[in-house]
Image (tube, rainbow, N blue to C red):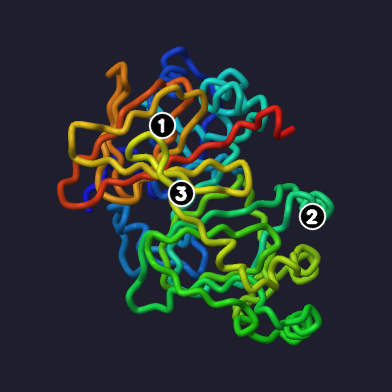
Amino acid sequence: MGIENTNTVNQRLEPRSLSLSRKDVDFLTKFPIKFIEGNFANYIWGGHYLYAMKGMFYDKDTPVAAESWEVSGHKKFSSRILMPDNRIFTLKDILKDRQLARLILGDTIVEHFGQDFPVLVKFIDVRQHMSVHLHPSHKIAKALGEEDPGKEEVFIVIDLHEDSECVLYMGLKDKVSRKEFETAISRGENILGLLHKIHVSPGEIFHIPSGVLHCWTGGSVAVEIAESSDLTYRVYDFLRQRPMHIKKGLTSIDFKFNQSATLKKECKGKWEAMLTKGLDSVVTRNALKVERIRAGLDDNPVKLDNRRTFEVLMGIDGILEIMSLKKDWLIHLHKGSSLLIPASAGDYLIRGIDEVNKNRALRISMKIPTNTDK
């Protein structure tokens, strides 16, 4: 699969100290930002699908890639930017400059959410079972003294491996008591049989609230969208000898929400058509704003104007051409690639150019609180 990988750097490179000229500032704020590829988390449950999707070289000796942290300001795997003179900066470091943060994120984002990049978006390849785990709420994470906040997640399934189970286990079954669950945990038993089992299909959307147990079994390729946090509590890991978080996990589980016959229905999302043709949205329970762009081959491109905040674009099908309304920049977005469109980069049009595949992308940002939200 062909992809514009001019910014691909397979090895880890240390970012240099921040010293920016006027041209550097323009490069970072007036045009879409394409990050260095290969920002992978090599967890043991991953595979090599993400390399293939991105058109990157791999062989049997290449480390597995469980997650590709596409646009991240998190210290664990901050996205890296290759400057025209080959210097490398991280998104986290760039946003420490308040002027740059306002130009990239938007004034209202900085005002309401601060200068740290507020979302974390990933492609994930689940070749083996993840652990059974959960993410605490913001309140519990703070009470437990965690540096990262709690989080909720949105998963959008984009592909399946044919030779795998392709199941999401989520929440406790209705008749499983808290005592039964805690006894199974204390004995180190496989607890999947205590959880709801949901077979997944490409295109499906799942909300994973904080406090809800879940486990993706081998077989799913998905987009993961969440607040910028890497806080995860494992309560069962199939005897793989990784660190566990039983005490914190039990403290964080929302047993009332887990134990619900309507859990699948409540956590299943769907696209709703918006007024702008070719644009759909999905309801989220937190400040995340998630939309889908469907760009055809006709003469009516999707117009995205009146922009005031940053936007992340993730290619999930086909090839899309993205052009500023002022015609001062043009870039292509392929399946498996992502862009950060700074707030100050202006309005733009998107049209599909792949005659074989559907041309679709995700558009991710943040909802700006209104006075009634306060």
Q: Residue beneath label 3, please?
A: 39
Q: Nearer the viewer, residue 1 or 306?
A: 306
Q: Residue furthest top?
A: 22
Left or right of residue 53, residue 311 in this image: right
- Residue at figure coordinates x 31%, y 49% from the top left: 335
Q: Residues within 10 Å of mark 1 (few under 14, many from 20)?
A: many
Amino acid tagged 3: Asn
Q: Earlier in the sequence, mark 2 or mark 3?
A: 3
Q: Residue beneath label 2, please?
A: 140
Element at label 2: helix
- Give the position of the N terminus as an image quadrant: bottom left
Q: Residues within 10 Å of mark 3 (few under 14, many from 20)?
A: many
Q: Residue beneath label 1, please?
A: 33
Residue 82 image-quadrant placement = top left
Amino acid tagged 1: Ile
Q: Nearer the viewer, residue 352 or 183?
A: 352
Distance of mark 1 from mark 2, alpha carbons?
A: 35 Å
Element at label 3: loop
- Residue at figure coordinates x 52%, y 37% from the top left: 365
Task: Reply above or below: 2 against 247.
Answer: above
Task: Reply above or below: 297 against 316.
Answer: above
Residue 46 position, x and y percent, is 45, 66
Element at label 1: loop
- Residue at figure coordinates x 63%, y 46% from the top left: 286
Q: Residues within 10 Å of mark 2 (few under 14, many from 20)?
A: some
Distance of mark 3 from mark 1, alpha carbons?
A: 15 Å
Mark linked to residue 128: none
Q: Nearer the viewer, mark 3 or mark 1?
A: 1
